[in-house]
C-alpha cells in the first residue's frame, strides 16, 4: 500500500510544503493562502525517479533510453499519466524516469 502524501507550492515563500494524510489538517493557513487560491494540492504518485526522488503530480520528467522525451505528470480518471503534448503515456515503475522540474519552475532549454 502506498503512502498518501501531498504537496502545495507556496507563492509567498517560493517553496513546496509537504503533507501526509496524518498532518494535513494542521496546515489550513497555507491552504487558505495558496492551495485554495489557484495552487492545488499535488498528490504523490507512489513512484520514485531513477535517483530515488518521489514523483508528484505536476512534476516534469524526462524518460526514454536517453532521457530524450519529457512530459508533465498528471492524474486523470484514476490513472497516473505523462502528458507529452501530443499524447498521454501511462506512468509506470521504471528506472528511466528522471525529474527535471515542475510546473512551478521555468525549465532550462
Image (spheres, rainbow, N blue to C red):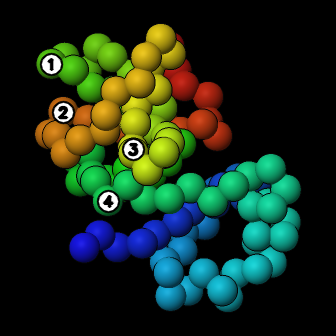
Mark 3 and mark 1 in contact (Cβ < 8 Å)? no
SS of the residue under disc 4: strand
Q: Mark 4 or mark 3, which has the lower sequence index?
A: 4
Q: Residues within 10 Å of mark 2 (few under 14, many from 20)?
A: some
> Which residue occupies the foreground of this view, 107 or 41?
41
Q: Label 1, on which residue?
A: 65
SS of the residue under disc 3: strand
* Residue 85 seen in the current view: yes
Which numbered disc covers residue 43?
Answer: none
Q: Give how far across and how far down residue 85 sits, in percent.
A: 50, 16
Q: Residues within 10 Å of mark 1 (few under 14, many from 20)?
A: few
Drawn side of residue 98 relative to residue 64, left or right: right
What is the distance, in whole Å, between disc 2 and disc 4 at their CAs?
Answer: 16 Å
Q: Label 3, on which residue?
A: 80
Which of label 2 and label 4 is nearer to you? Answer: 4
Q: Label 4, on which residue?
A: 46
* Residue 98 seen in the current view: no
Drawn side of residue 8 relative to residue 102, left or right: right
Which of label 4 and label 3 is nearer to you? Answer: 3
Q: Label 2, on which residue?
A: 96
What is the distance, in whole Å, between disc 2 and disc 3 at their CAs?
Answer: 16 Å
Amino acid at each position: 500500500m502506498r503512502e498518501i502524501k501531498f504537496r502545495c507550492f507556496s507563492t509567498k515563500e517560493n517553496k513546496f510544503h509537504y503533507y501526509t494524510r496524518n498532518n494535513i489538517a494542521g496546515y489550513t493557513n497555507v491552504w487558505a493562502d495558496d492551495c485554495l487560491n489557484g495552487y492545488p494540492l499535488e498528490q504523490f504518485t507512489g513512484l520514485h525517479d531513477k535517483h530515488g526522488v518521489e514523483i508528484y503530480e505536476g512534476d516534469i520528467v524526462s524518460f526514454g533510453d536517453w532521457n530524450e522525451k519529457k512530459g508533465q505528470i498528471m492524474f486523470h480518471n484514476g490513472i497516473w499519466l505523462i502528458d507529452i503534448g501530443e499524447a498521454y503515456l501511462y506512468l509506470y515503475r521504471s528506472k528511466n524516469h528522471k525529474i527535471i522540474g515542475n510546473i512551478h519552475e521555468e525549465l532550462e532549454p
